[in-house]
Amino acid sequence: MANEDPENRVGTKNRGNTNPPSYYSPSYYLDSTETMWTSWLVPMIVVANVGMFVAIMFVNDCPKNNLGFEGNCVAKFLGRFSFEPLRENPLFGPSSSTLEKLGALEWNKVAHGHQGWRLITCIWLHAGVVHLLANMLSLVFIGIRLEQQFGFVLVGAIYLLSGVGGSILSSLFIQRSISVGASGALFGLLGAMLSELLTNWTIYTNKAAALFTLVIIIVINLAVGILPHVDNFAHIGGFLTGFLLGFILLLRPQFGWLERRNLPAGARAISKFTVYQYVFLLVALVLLIAGGTGTAIQRGECKRSLQLVLLPQLCADLKMEL
């Protein structure tokens, strides 16, 4: 397992990083007096990820567990927190066995070992200091702005569900190495930003610039996933999940509806949301339900085929958790 991934030599698929979008600012809204939430969830997520990485390194204990076959531990002055040899992990982090022990995503354990919890735990693990810093800096720039705009409940839900969505797609296509990282969740926030822009189109000024900038950012980051040994499946799965959730959770009322109290008596009432906002919401909801239903059906078929000792290849092809 330790030599399966030449990128970091710890057998993990690095889920990459996300460049923070610079366009996302309240100045793009017509309503400049909008109340901003205080961001506390995103900083807590950052602290949790850093704390988890410290715990990983404590468990890893390179001086005790490394036998020296791949070189000496890096930064020995850190004691048991020193990093694995660079030949094994150039990202300055733990070994693949430690990550696997603590909950890294591994298809075989999810599909056949009844360890579906790895779909969530892998989001909180990182392959090294470089991997951790890239993801946490991206989360700060992306997540804080979203949390200020929409609150911790919605942003937290999108972050977690997108991370799981990325993990599911990754587990279906990446089977020979483990995968860790929060990039699926980060791409979910990017996807939610895009759907939020589309569904709240009427309240934006300079729409073309906002859309163009965000699309460029998304394309660049998805292009990074084309590079060898970067887990783009987690990126895509997280992005699609966040994109659909954004249509459902990040609706904004029309500007005219917000000003309804200032309208003269007898003035025509303005609906809270536009027709196309409802259409986007309905389509996204149908797609999410269809995806969940399809997964449940496939799992059921796979279980029945095993029980009847029939169609064993079906289960292998579906690659679903039993």
Image (spheres, rainbow, N blue to C red):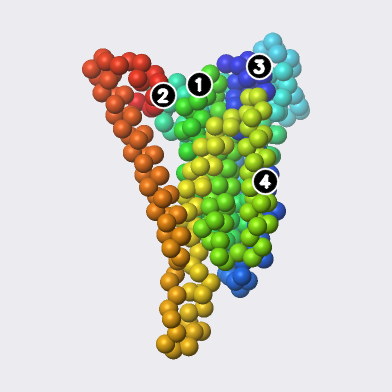
Mark 4 or 3, which is nearer the eye?
4
* Side (left or right) of 273 relative to 302: right
* Side (left or right) of 264 relative to 52: left
Mark 3 or 1, which is nearer the eye?
1
Give the answer, above or below, for where 112 lies relative to 28. Answer: above
Give the answer, above or below, for where 239 lies relative to 125. Answer: below
Give the answer, above or below, for where 26 lies relative to 120. Answer: below
Residue located 67% across and 19% down the image = 6
Identify the secondary structure beneath mark 3. Answer: loop
Other-residue count near label 3 (Cα within 10 Å), few / some / many at <14 / 14–19 / ≥20: some
> CA–CA distance between discs 4 and 3?
43 Å
Q: Which residue is mark 4?
A: 216
Other-residue count near label 1 (Cα within 10 Å), few / some / many at <14 / 14–19 / ≥20: some
Residue located 51% across and 46% down the image = 242
Q: Which residue is mark 1?
A: 175
Callout 2 touching callout 1 (CB < 8 Å): yes
| Mark 1 or mark 4: whose residue is earlier in sequence | 1
Q: Which residue is mark 2?
A: 319
Hey, which quadrant is residue 99 in on the image? top right
Amino acid type assigned to the residue bearing label 2 in the image: Lys
Residue located 62% across and 57% down the image = 145
> CA–CA distance between discs 4 and 2?
33 Å
